[in-house]
Image: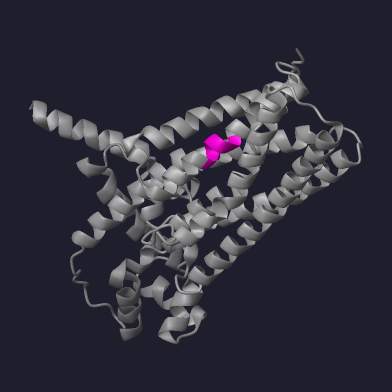
């Protein structure tokens, strides 16, 4: 047996991956097609690491690894990332038969590894065939890397294509923002994987721990996205649906100038204040007025600054969610993001500055008030 800090980290990642994968694949909460592909991807990453862990920890010998256990899971990672990405980018499109053809390399690799296992299981051993199989394994590794890189670049191109029609992307489709970050990370990891493979082929040290630990980190990251971020996104969708269904036309008191009237209409129409990217510069450009002059009018006529005016509207929006029984169990970050804040930290700080309470304190106080009324 060979247990050390490195393969302990790898084992922790494997176990975590199986838990994440099981939760995503079998929980009815995560029934979105894209999320199911993500759960399968996490499980495959974990299985791939597991078989190498068994060999590295000397639970089985290297010979047993390739004659009994080995399955070329690395040939599955690219297609599964592709399927997940396509369902995430284009939720209404199904995976086509042409897409499924990306599984052919895995089927070929699996068939060859099965033939090799059968050949060795029958007690047949040929030095030339063994050397040939070594080259095949190296070829599988190198092909997997190039295959994954091409798929990652294709998906990044698809995100860029979609983002041109859906701006700002971080507001409309935030999931594409963090998926793009994952793709770039995977792209960088592929080159590290390539370097480690070339070093291994030239028998220059054993650098595979870098890849196995990196995959363990990817498992955690993907699991976090699959379980946590997916939950937040689903909550945001429901809040958004509620907002659209319950939006009412607001009647405003007549301000002192037409410019401020236009400003109020612009910010409130369609609840533009919920856009975290809304700035004084943007509003001034839309109203075709100088930023300085608009700021001066807001200060003099509304007796507040632009940031405070917008944040007060966002706080009122957040209050309507915090006091809604339908959203009682929703996360504060989902509520904050849907109310127009760029992060949970900004939401907490701004809410406390305006109300003197944190969102959780406000929510708790409102709940206690309702409870007292019911008791009375």
Q: Quadrant of the C terminus?
A: top left
- 95 relative position to 248: left or right: right
Work out which residue is located at the far bottom of the displayed protein and give it: 288
Q: Is residue 42 magenta?
A: yes
How far across and down, in percent of the image, does residue 21 sit?
48, 34
How far across and down, in percent of the image, does residue 14 sit?
60, 28
Work out which residue is located at the far top of the displayed protein and give it: 1
Quadrant of residue 124 within the rendered picture: top right
The magenta stretch is: 41-45
- 67 relative position to 278: left or right: right
Q: Nearer the viewer, residue 27 or 1?
A: 1
Residue drawn at 49 percent across, 28 percent down: 19
**Looking at the image, how many numbered discs can be counted on the residues?**
0
How far across and down, in percent of the image, does residue 347 sit?
43, 49
- 9 relative position to 338: left or right: right
Main SS type for the magenta part?
helix
Q: Nearer the viewer, residue 277 or 146?
A: 146
Work out whether 297 lies above or below 30: below
Q: Is residue 77 magenta?
A: no
How far across and down, in percent of the image, does residue 334 sit?
38, 47
Colouring used for the render: one colour
Q: Quadrant of the N terminus?
A: top right
Q: Nearer the viewer, residue 248 or 128?
A: 128
Q: Could one spot residue 201 in this view of the protein?
A: yes
- 305 relative position to 155: left or right: left
Residue drawn at 67 percent across, 29 percent down: 117
């Amino acid at each position: 047996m060979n247990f050390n800090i490195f393969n302990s980290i790898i084992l922790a990642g494997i176990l975590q991956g199986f838990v994440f994968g099981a939760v995503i694949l079998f929980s009815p909460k995560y029934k979105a097609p894209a999320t199911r592909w993500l759960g399968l991807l996490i499980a495959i990453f974990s299985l791939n690491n597991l078989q190498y862990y068994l060999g590295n920890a000397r639970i089985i010998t290297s010979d047993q690894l390739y004659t009994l256990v080995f399955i070329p899971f690395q040939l599955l990672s690219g297609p599964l990332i592709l399927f997940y990405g396509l369902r995430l980018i284009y939720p209404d499109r199904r995976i086509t038969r042409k897409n499924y053809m990306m599984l052919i390399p895995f089927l070929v690799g699996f068939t060859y590894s099965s033939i090799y296992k059968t050949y060795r299981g029958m007690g047949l051993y040929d030095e030339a065939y063994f050397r040939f199989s070594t080259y095949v394994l190296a070829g599988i590794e190198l092909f997997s890397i190039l295959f994954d890189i091409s798929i990652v670049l294709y998906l990044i191109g698809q995100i860029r294509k979609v983002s041109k029609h859906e701006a700002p992307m971080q507001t409309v489709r935030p999931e594409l923002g963090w998926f793009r970050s994952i793709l770039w990370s995977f792209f960088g990891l592929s080159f590290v994987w390539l370097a480690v493979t070339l070093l291994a082929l030239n028998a220059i040290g054993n650098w595979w721990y870098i890849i196995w630990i990196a995959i363990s980190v990817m498992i955690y990251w993907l699991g976090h996205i699959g379980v946590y971020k997916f939950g937040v996104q689903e909550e945001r969708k429901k809040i958004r649906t509620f907002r659209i269904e319950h939006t009412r036309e607001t009647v405003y008191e007549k301000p002192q100038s037409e410019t401020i009237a236009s400003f109020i209409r612009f910010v409130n129409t369609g609840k533009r204040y919920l856009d975290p990217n809304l700035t004084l510069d943007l509003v001034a450009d839309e109203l075709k007025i100088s930023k300085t002059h608009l700021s001066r009018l807001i200060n003099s006529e509304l007796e507040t600054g632009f940031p405070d005016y917008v944040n007060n509207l966002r706080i009122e929006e957040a209050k309507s969610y915090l006091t809604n029984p339908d959203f009682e169990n929703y996360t504060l970050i989902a509520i904050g993001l849907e109310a127009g804040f760029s992060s949970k930290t900004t939401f907490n700080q701004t809410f406390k500055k305006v109300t003197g309470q944190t969102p959780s304190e406000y929510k708790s106080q409102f709940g206690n008030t309702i409870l007292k009324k019911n008791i009375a």
